[in-house]
């Protein structure tokens, strides 16, 4: 997967929150069209990669595709094991 970081400074990442409305990345910087989510949810790197593959196949690899969003880091499970 090309979206995973090579190194991270700290191993365990915090979950954060999903409440509120978006205040950043509200305008399209590149291109003419954009995708918008209909509800709040965690988007994984696998989902972003699947969307990228589907879009490039739909465009038949003739257009340019810019991706601004980054996926969430893996969340460590608490407990033994």
Image (spheres, rainbow, N blue to C red):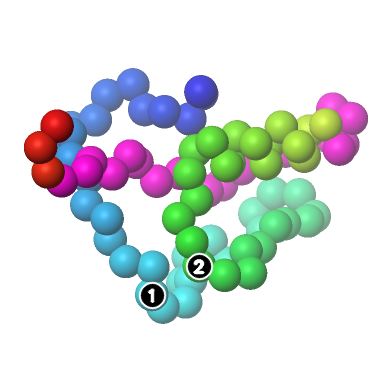
Q: Secondary structure at mark 1?
A: loop
Q: Is residue 30 left or right of residue 2?
A: right
Q: Position of residue 2 (x, y in %)?
A: 51, 23
- Magenta stretch secondary structure, dominant: loop
Q: Position of residue 64 (x, y in %)?
A: 77, 35
Q: Is residue 64 left or right of residue 76?
A: right
| Gap in angstroms between the C-alphas marked 2 and 1 | 8 Å
Magenta segment includes 61: yes
Q: Among all residues in the image, which is located at the extreme front? A: 80
- Residue at horizontal 28 percent and vertical 61 percent from the top: 16
Q: Position of residue 28 (x, y in %)?
A: 67, 58
**Pointer 2 local density, CA inside 10 Å: few below 14, some 14–19, many at least 20:** few
Kindly indicate whether the residue at mark 1 contacts the one at mark 2 (C-beta within 8 angstroms): yes
Q: In the rendering, which numbered label is found on residue 19?
A: 1
Q: Among all residues in the image, which is located at the extreme left? A: 80
Q: In the rendering, which numbered label is found on residue 40?
A: 2
Q: Is residue 27 visible?
A: no
- Residue at horizontal 22 percent and vertical 43 percent from the top: 77
Q: Secondary structure at mark 2?
A: loop
Q: Is residue 74 left or right of residue 44?
A: left
The front one of 69 and 41 is 41
| Whether residue 32 is situated above or below residue 48 in the rendered picture | below
- Residue at horizontal 87 percent and vertical 36 percent from the top: 59
- Earlier in the chain: of badge 2 and badge 1, it is 1
Q: How many marks?
A: 2
- Residue at horizontal 23 percent and vertical 41 percent from the top: 76
| Whether residue 39 is situated above or below residue 46 in the rendered picture | below
The front one of 25 and 10 is 10
The front one of 66 and 41 is 41
The magenta segment: 58-78
């Amino acid at each position: 997967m090309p979206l995973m970081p090579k190194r991270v400074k700290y191993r365990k990442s915090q979950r954060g929150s999903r409440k509120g409305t978006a205040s950043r990345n509200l305008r399209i910087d590149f291109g003419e069209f954009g995708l918008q989510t209909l509800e709040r949810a965690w988007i994984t790197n696998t989902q972003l990669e699947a969307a990228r593959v589907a879009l490039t196949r739909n465009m038949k690899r003739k257009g340019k595709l810019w991706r601004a969003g980054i996926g969430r880091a893996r969340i460590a499970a608490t407990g033994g094991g």
